[in-house]
Image (tube, coloured by chain):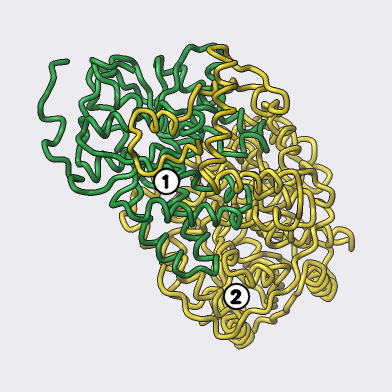
Amino acid sequence: MTTTPTPSRPPVPGPPQDTSPTFVGMPTFHRAARAALDDTQQRRNLHHATRTIRDKRSRAVAELPHWEELRRAGAAAKDEALDHLADYLIRLEERLTAGGATVHWARDAAEANRIVLDIVRAKEAEEVVKVKSMVTQEIELNEALEAAGVNAWETDLAELIVQLGHDRPSHILVPAIHRNRREIRDIFQREMAAVGRPAPKDLTDEPSRLAEAARLHLREKFLRARVGVSGANFAIADTGSLVVVESEGNGRMCLTLPETLISVVGIEKVLPSWDDLGALLQLLPRSSTGERMNPYTTIWSGVHEGDGPQEVHVVLLDNGRTHVLGDRLGRQALRCIRCSACLNVCPVYERTGGHAYGSVYPGPIGAVLNPQLRGTESDIDRSLPWASSLCGACYDACPVGIDIPELLVELRSRVAGDRGRTAESVAMAATTWLFSDPRRLTAAQRATGVAGRLVGDRTIRSVPGLGAWTNARDLPNPPPESFRTWWARERGGGTREGSGR
Amino acid sequence: MLEPRDDVVPSEPRTSGQRVALFATCFNDTLWPETPKATVHLLERLGVSVDFPADQTCCGQMLTNSGYGSSALPLVRRFVDVFGGYDAVVAPSGSCVGSVRVQHRRIAEESDDDSLADRVAELGPRVYELSEFLVDVLGVEDVGASFPHRVTYHPTCHSLRMLRVDDRPLRLLRAVRGIDLVELPEAQECCGFGGTFALKNADISISMGSDKARHVVGTGAEVLVAGDNSCLAHIGGILGRWRTGIRPMHLAEILAATEGTPA
């Protein structure tokens, strides 16, 4: 990483965000995961889908000999923005305003939703068309709009499937990854008619037929809607530009057809300069879809008379982000560009799917981001730092070099520290005591040796209290003597004898 | 094929005159003593005089990864006290070496003890996982071993992604006399052990381990080899429960085996 400049002003950590109503009372990760593991259809869908994207990504990354340099450049651009966030946000606001956009600041989800709703009401609109956006899911904007009588139509194919299925997204990039095409056909046939153009009666599960049904269903919404809502992949401070990267072209429709465009943008999306896009627009598509380039990149800078939306609003959202920024180690999670490469390579995510993570941000990045954004008050957020075997595949795949395993370990220490004295903390203190003196270790090893001699060659298939291990795994037989005992006898001289005899 | 060769052992090991210590690791010392014993036999066969400083205990990884990094601080201090005077430290565990090289640094930096951080940073690069020590320090790939069995190799996560041992273990295994080394499908995927993950998220751990075990069975191998006994205990525990008869073995034990002293 390049040298990090000292922040121009120390960030003032804001409060963590509130857990959204949808995820309040979510069970711990391992309980939610157990149910997901039993869903054999979902397991097959996820296995197939993650393997396909994983292989595509590996090929796309292997093509670039300077991938590591790109990663460092991407991380450096994000770090520069995060280390001077207040300055770049103010510059972004100035440039956006100069371009004719209206900038709003939102402390939390409720404030952002109220700002969006006020604009929609002022336009007397009863519906909005939406570009796929993580941040509007994070703040549950659709639910807030619907509660106020405004329909929010998702126009990304996978988000449409999730919305029509009264479901929740389970992946950042491919939110309907847990569904196969037969399930999608059934959802289209059952649900489309109630909210617009019905699916054809003879719809099959051919991908091209499914896409055509969605296209026809959405077309009338694109042409009718007067307000579009989006997020942004990047917000460029020096030009006042917002960038949306997508594959289907539905985003381009929403960003250009309606008279009014509202973009909700997390404050960590800011990039210092237009030049930073060079690295990031290479990193993102190769990491997320495994493509060299994404099919559609839309960039707009304020309002242009007679071309595109004539009223452009940008809602800059905190919602826990300055809370993360205040943490020296944890702030690297704010580099995340939501590519989802870490989900696709994660053996845990592949088996549990996204819902078990209790957030719109699942997988390894969710396991570090949610407990930082929301704090560690709830059962789910306290359990997420353990939702990993620390295998490190996520760190290798991350295009902006977020050391997710390191963050997981750090978050574990925070949760363990908060819990105070527990059976585990007592056991850990005993472990330190044991290993702080080789004589204690030797004494413990003698007990192991006695156990070993008692067990002999028999296979250990069950030990009281160790059911979590022995339910499905045999235990190794304890050896009759430790290595250090052997060494003392066979090589004796060594340095110190250390056997405590 | 099996005739003895003179060129396998450098006549003068590169470590000649240097002080080499064995870090057995607490797990191996207590539960799998055959592995550090094999490491000693192997290194002595290669002309390396290895020392076992008896004051060594544990790298503290289990504490750190469980969220008790500050409790690991005395163990970090002990590690540099015990091993700081050696020219090279070798351990038959990718995971424990990963802990020493990566985690000790952070723990020391977060403590108030600046001199400890310096000593940790200074010692770290001299701590080697077994395959690194053999290939990089001694400069050997053919260690003169003989192991006439069908074997498949699982690269453990920390050796692969923390230490970047790359194909060093495979290069060592390929040079073993009589070995039938078969490729493990999806080898780079985690086995699901993950320390306390194996207990705290036992269902997912077993699911991952079962997939790994199925791939191992599919190779038709008699022996599963890896550089970490903890991962081997997990995969081996499943292979055992399934009554597959496949034997988990540490890399050191295969490399120590010769025609005269088979494993």
Q: The chain drawn green is chain what? A: B
SS under mark 2? loop
Q: Position of residue A63 (x, y in %)?
A: 34, 50
**Residue in view at x 80 percent, y 62 percent:** A18
- B81 vs B28, nearest the viewer: B81
Check if mark 2 and mark 1 are on a common chain: no
What residue would you read off at disc 1? B97
Say which mark, if any, is on residue A307: 2
Point out which mark residue A478 bears: none
| Residue furthest to the right | A148
Which residue corresponds to the image point at 57% horizontal and 78% vertical from the top-left? A301
In this rendered view, identify the residue nearer to me: A443 or A47: A443
Q: How many marks?
A: 2
Residue A234: image location, x then y, percent: 56, 68
| Circle 1 chain | B
**Residue B102: x percent and y percent?**
45, 54
Q: Is residue A328 left or right of residue A167?
A: left
Q: Residues within 10 Å of mark 2 (few under 14, many from 20)?
A: few
For mark 2, name the chain. Answer: A
The amino acid type of the residue labelled 2 equals Asp
Q: The chain drawn yellow is chain what?
A: A
Can I make out residue B80 in this image? yes
Distance Cα–Cα, label 2 vs label 1: 60 Å
